[in-house]
């Protein structure tokens, strides 16, 4: 059976390598349902382009660049999941805290953006629920994000071996965490840094323009040319090549 690359595709018999690496760190002792759910949350954080501050400091020289338009790099995720997950636990292990760093390639501007790329993950046990919040760190005035998870819905409160057999509805869990925590926070941070979060027509490889433009007539190409100077030049060059091939 092929090993899934992301947690949302995991099954009771096949989990991603980075989750196995996180679980192996706690294989010797008894792990509670809350601790397992916290590990799953961190696993989604890694896949979403976040990492614990301490781990980032230790492994930053080995990380692959992560562009603003993406966040998942399997080499980074597997590398970072090898490091111990060191949550700060408080109030008899009912509160878990972790400082996160967002991964994004900034080049020479990285030092000025360090504070913006920091966030604080906190998970609080409320009976059978886990309240998870992701907040920017001071002095940021931006809002934070939160989601309330049913512990038993995603991690069975029974001792099963291997431990991944206790996991349920991981695709739903990943969707909840991405949509309500990690994607909004990453988008907020990148907007603060004035980074382009989505691919644009100007970012396409040169060879793809001909494949797109060949489906457009002359009037449509004129509309494209009015967008900006770069597309004006590119569309004009394409029209010249099209004209020459008809001669």
Image (cartoon, rainbow, N blue to C red):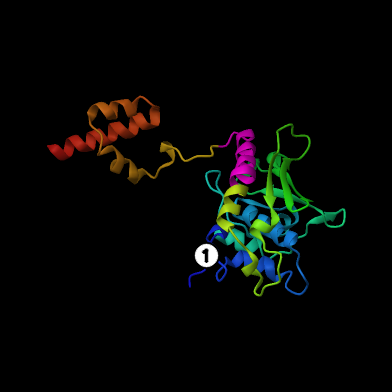
Q: What is the residue that sits farthest to the left in this orientation?
A: 247
Q: Is residue 15 left or right of residue 224?
A: right
* Position of residue 116 measured from the top left corner of the image (x, y, whole percent): 70, 39
**Residue 180 magenta:** yes
Q: In this orientation, does residue 121 appear?
A: yes
The stretch in magenta equals 178-195
Depth order, front residue of 126/137? 126
Q: Is residue 88 left or right of residue 121?
A: right
| Occupied quadrant, residue 218 | top left
Please state the total of marks drawn on the protein image: 1
Residue at image coords 57%, 65%: 16
Depth order, front residue of 235/18? 18
Residue at image coords 72%, 59%: 58
Residue at image coords 59%, 55%: 47
Helix, strand or loop: magenta stretch: helix
The answer to whether residue 161 is above or below residue 153 is below
> Crowding at label 1, few (<14), some or many (≥20) Cα neighbours within 10 Å?
some
* Position of residue 217 measured from the top left corner of the image (x, y, whole percent): 23, 31
Q: Is residue 169 left or right of residue 51?
A: left
**Residue 144 magenta:** no
Residue at image coords 68%, 56%: 42
State which quarter of the image contains the C terminus: top left
Q: Is residue 235 left or right of residue 37?
A: left
* Position of residue 55 measured from the top left corner of the image (x, y, whole percent): 72, 58
Q: In this orientation, does residue 61 appear?
A: no
| Occupied quadrant, residue 73 | bottom right
- Secondary structure state at the residue bearing disc 1: loop
The answer to whether residue 226 is above or below residue 32 is above
Residue picked out by circle 1:
4
* Position of residue 105 measured from the top left corner of the image (x, y, whole percent): 59, 47
């Amino acid at each position: 059976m092929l090993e899934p690359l992301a947690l949302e595709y995991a099954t009771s018999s096949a989990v991603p390598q980075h989750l196995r690496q996180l679980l192996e760190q706690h294989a010797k002792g008894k792990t509670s349902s809350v601790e397992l759910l916290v590990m799953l949350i961190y696993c989604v954080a890694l896949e979403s382009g976040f990492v614990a501050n301490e781990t980032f400091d230790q492994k930053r020289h080995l990380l692959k660049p992560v562009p603003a338009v993406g966040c998942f790099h399997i080499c980074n995720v597997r590398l970072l999941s090898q490091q111990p997950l060191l949550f700060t636990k408080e109030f008899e292990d009912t509160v878990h805290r972790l400082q996160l760093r967002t991964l994004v390639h900034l080049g020479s501007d990285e030092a000025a953006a360090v504070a913006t790329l920091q966030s604080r993950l906190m998970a609080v046990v409320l009976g059978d629920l886990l309240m998870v919040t992701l907040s920017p760190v001071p002095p940021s005035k931006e809002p934070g994000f939160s989601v309330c998870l049913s512990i038993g819905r995603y991690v069975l409160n029974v001792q099963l071996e291997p431990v991944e057999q206790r996991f349920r509805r991981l695709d739903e869990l990943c969707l909840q965490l991405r949509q309500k925590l990690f994607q909004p926070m990453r988008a907020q941070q990148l907007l603060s840094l004035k980074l382009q979060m989505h691919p644009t027509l100007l970012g396409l490889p040169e060879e793809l323009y001909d494949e797109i433009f060949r489906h457009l007539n002359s009037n449509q190409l004129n509309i494209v040319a009015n967008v900006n100077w770069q597309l004006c030049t590119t569309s004009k060059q394409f029209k010249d090549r099209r004209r020459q091939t008809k001669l």
